[in-house]
Amino acid sequence: MGEVMLALARTFASLKSGRVWLYVLTPAVLSLFVSIGLAIWGLGSFVQWMLAYPPMTWLAGWGLLWLATFLAYLGGWMAIFAIAYVLASLLAAIVIMPLILKHLSASEYGDVAPMGKDSFVAAAMNSVVASLIFVVAWLATIPLWLIPGLSLLLPLLLMAWLNRRTFAYDALSMHASEAEWRDMRKQHKTPLFMLGLTMALLAHVPLIGLLVPALAALAFVHFGLESLRRSRGGALVTIEGETL
């Protein structure tokens, strides 16, 4: 957990920079406008759709229409938040992550040589695939939310997985070689997930939830590049005849 705490500490320390705040706020503001639009024009239709299918019809048949309506509205708001979070995550991964990497590589991690592949297409595909899997898993687990506790636990675990899957790869794709990425994913499997889970918990804090995807991108860059620096042990790296 020491590596996770260090990454979080450096993440919040980075917020002293106005440029970093711009990176953090951009996906949040855009996703907020989408959330407002969905709440105004889509929430009612989504609630009516949920009330027409089990288990809501079962609850209504048992004389618990109020509970079915409450759960439908709860599911609707959670769906809006999930859509907004996925959108913010995509923006953070595809648009903001390269900017954060460039900023931190030039300042705090100038000694970490880029030995990976700077592929925008690969990073974008990774983010899109992760988001699609998240959406499918989120929809598939909705019936389980009736089990006490799972309505809180399942979204947290899914969001933690989305954070790790999206940002861990994107943070290291440019700097880590394929062998280094495999070793990193194996040796730091638990810390990477715990960092994703920590950011998922922060996402459920009122008012800052939509800031979390960009904060997660920042945290995973700090975690990944510092871990890469330590794994190389400060060794000099030679690329095309130049010592880095």
Image (spheres, helix red, strand yellow):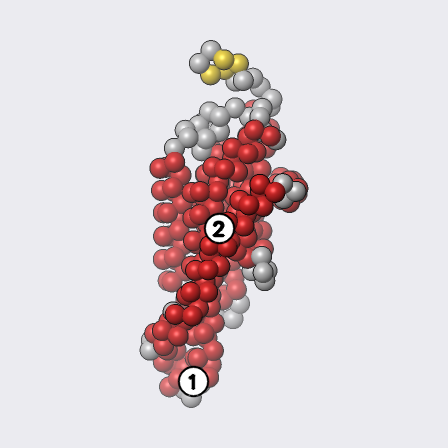
For mark 2, does the 10 Å Cα neighbourhood hold few (<14), some (14 to 19), or many (20 or more) residues? many
Quadrant position of the C terminus in the picture: top right
Residue, disc 1: 65
Q: Which of the 4 image quarters holds residue 191?
A: top right
Return the residue nearer the eye: 101 or 237.
Answer: 101
Q: Residues within 10 Å of mark 1 (few under 14, many from 20)?
A: some
Quadrant location, the N terminus: top right
Q: How far apart are the alpha carbons under marks 1 and 2?
A: 38 Å
Residue 71 vs 92, above or below: the answer is below
Residue behind mark 2:
27
Q: Are marks 1 and 2 in contact (CB under 8 Å)?
A: no
Callout in the foreground (1, 2): 2
- Is residue 160 visible from the viewing direction of this image? no
Is label 2 in a helix, a strand or a loop?
A: helix
Residue 160: percent from left, percent from top: 50, 52
Instruction: Please give the name of the residue rendered at 55% of the width and 53% of the height, measured from the top-left corner.
Output: 211
**Helix, strand, or loop for circle 1?**
helix
Q: Residue at x 43, y 53 (%)?
A: 87
Tell me if 121 is positioned left or right of 167 in this view: left
Mark closer to the chain start, 1 or 2: 2
